[in-house]
Amino acid sequence: MEKPKIIDLPKFEDPRGNLSFIEENSHIPFKIERTYWIYDVPGGQVRGGHAFKRQEELIVALSGSFDVTVDDGKAREVFSLNRSYYGLYVPAGIWRQMQNFSTNSLALVLSSTPYNENDYIRVYDEYLEFRKKQL
Ligand code: TYD
């Protein structure tokens, strides 16, 4: 099974300001079907405690910083995102949670699927059952 990993995005440094970009199937291993973003997160709040059965995604801290905890049912890892030229690739079937949002942080999520509530696993015990069936 694929593991979450940081993808280095292109970065054009320029005295006028830096520029980064993402192309589907080139910098990330999926076609982008949806983009959403999480912003104005009050201090101490937690987002995204769930897994997706099919959705793959790339998470970028466009502004500020936050942590993403990923969990494959056996091991947990925390990625601190604080640069807009790093993307965290999260394959399908991984439990993930976002926390420690800094003031004015902006989390961009590129998704391989349209929104579908049936793709979510929102209960951790159900996630563990799902993982067992996958093995
Ligand atoms: P959700 O993914 O549950 O947020 P989080 O996991 O960060 O707590 O999304 C919150 C609500 O937003 C959900 O009930 C439905 C809606 N939503 C959409 O309609 N479309 C989307 O693309 C997303 C991501 C959420």
Image: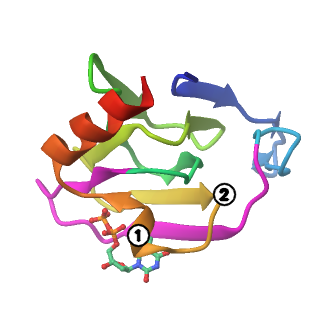
Q: Position of residue 16 (x, y in %)?
A: 81, 51
Q: Secondary structure at mark 2?
A: loop
Q: Secondary structure at mark 1?
A: helix
Horizontal side, residue 59 vs residue 27: left or right: left
Query: Which amino acid type corresponds to the residue marked 1 in the rendered image?
Result: Asn
Q: Residue at x 81, y 36 (%)?
A: 10
The quarter in which the N terminus is drawn is: top right
Whether the magenta-drawn stretch holds residue 102 is answered as: no
Whether the magenta-drawn stretch holds residue 49 is answered as: yes
Q: Would the CB of label 2 be found within 8 Å of ligand 1?
A: no
Ligand 1, image quadrant it occupies: bottom left
Horizontal side, residue 17 vs residue 128: left or right: right
Q: Residue at x 26, y 42 (%)?
A: 127
In this view, the residue in front, 99 or 34, is: 34
Q: CA distance from mark 2 to mark 1?
A: 15 Å
Q: Residue at x 28, y 45 (%)?
A: 97
The quarter in which the C terminus is drawn is: top left
Q: Residue at x 26, y 66 (%)?
A: 41
Q: Position of residue 8 (x, y in %)?
A: 70, 28
Q: N-terminal of the two: label 2 or label 1?
A: 2
Residue 125 is drawn in which quadrant?
Answer: top left
Q: Residues within 10 Å of mark 2 (few under 14, many from 20)?
A: many
- Compared to residue 48, the image places residue 25 above or below, namely above
Q: Residues within 10 Å of mark 1 (few under 14, many from 20)?
A: few
Query: Which amino acid type corresponds to the residue marked 2 in the rendered image?
Result: Ser
Please name the residue that numbered disc 2 is placed on.
Answer: 112
Stretch of the chain drawn in magenta: 30-51
Please name the residue that numbered disc 1 is placed on.
Answer: 118
Question: In the image, which disc is placed on residue 51?
Answer: none
Q: Position of residue 78 (x, y in %)?
A: 32, 25
- Compared to residue 31, the image places residue 68 above or below, namely above
In this view, the residue in front, 134 or 84, is: 134
